[in-house]
Amino acid sequence: MSKLAKFRRGPAVFFADVKSPLLRALGARMAPVLERPVVRQTLLDPLATLEGVALLSPVAERVKQARQLHRTRLLEEAGHPLVSVVMAAWNAGTTVEAAIESMQAQSYDNFELIVVDDGSSDDTCAVVRRFVVRDPRIRLVHLAHNAGAAHARNVGLHEAQGEFLSFHDADDFSHPQRIERQLCAILRSPQTMFSLCNYSRVDDEGQVLSINGREVSKSVISMMFRRQVFTRIGYFRDFRISEDAEYYERMKLIFGAGAEHLLAKVLYLQGFSPASLLFSDGKTEREGDAVEHQRSAEAEQKLREIQRLHLQIRSGEDSGFVPYLAGDG
């Protein structure tokens, strides 16, 4: 992550981590300004701020319209390619409806949504089936036994037909222009292999939470990529945790950081639950809208394992390709 990205996502954390006493002192002096709501919003989501200014400025409004026209032309020239979105779901009966509806509300409608029910014991399948009978873009794959998110996503990838692929969790929400903007970010350059957007985490009441001092972070699960990326690196490793981060880092390692386009806009909202796999692993404490999470020893060990695997890719000992294992479907 660049220093600019770290600064934008959490100025206080950025200055607290710097080694230079001068910069730390500067951060302390600037803190009152940096914490002003308008400054925080501009740092966290500059495109949203620009769009807000567009309401007051005819020039900015024309810029906004020109950008939309450019995206429309890009999609037309590309022939409106199919985007496959894989949604792994386990006991998501209370959240999957809103997640699917956020996909149905997308401004770009040439997508297929593959919902992989990972052996749920609640009414997840019944909820999804109600959408399947009404919307031909939505498919349901039911797995007899729970095997984890990596397994479910692999099944979805195996079923996907799209020229571009992406993901969506069953307790999350996408901005109506997420698919359109991420797809156009890739289409603008043949060198761009994958795109991501920023996300914020919200609780059941819609309150935006600060996670370890950050309200906005890069959304790894939002990654969208060309099929040739999938052909080259294959499937998720069968990890219980950090499987999405490993996949993303493997993409960067093989295709290079220059193949990525990060949209500096919050286009994805992730739900918060202390009982979720992420927050139940390790130690999580919440006070108001501030959440502090410390990874478990198992998670730290998994990260070290990922680093070792990626060193093998760098050295040429491992191709980085992960095959589809027999029995995944």
Image: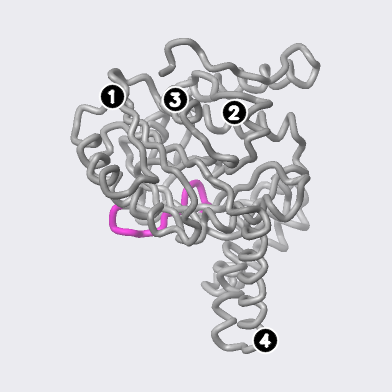
Residue named by callout 4:
59
| Mark with earlier residue (1, 4) | 4
- Front: mark 1 or 3: 3
Asked if labels 2 and 1 touch by Cβ distance under 8 angstroms, the answer is: no
Q: Residue at label 1?
A: 119
Residue drawn at the location 50% of the way across and 30% of the way down: 157
Q: CA distance from mark 2 to mark 3?
A: 18 Å
In three-dimensional space, the C-alpha distance between marks 3 and 4, rounded to whole angstroms, equals 47 Å
Which residue carries the number 3 mark?
155
Q: Nearer the viewer, mark 1 or mark 2?
A: 1
Q: Nearer the viewer, residue 100 or 173?
A: 100
Q: Amino acid at mark 4?
A: Val
User: Which residue shows up at 75% across the image and 40% down it?
Assistant: 257
| Quadrant position of residue 245 | top right
Q: CA distance from mark 1 to mark 2?
A: 24 Å
Q: Which mark is residue 96?
A: none
Give 38 or 28, whichever is nearer the viewer: 38
Task: Give the labeled residue for mark 2.
Answer: 246
Which one is earlier in the sequence, the residue at label 4 or at label 2?
4
Q: Is residue 205 magenta?
A: yes
* In this view, the mark in front (2 or 3): 3
- Give percent across and percent down for residue 81: 58, 48
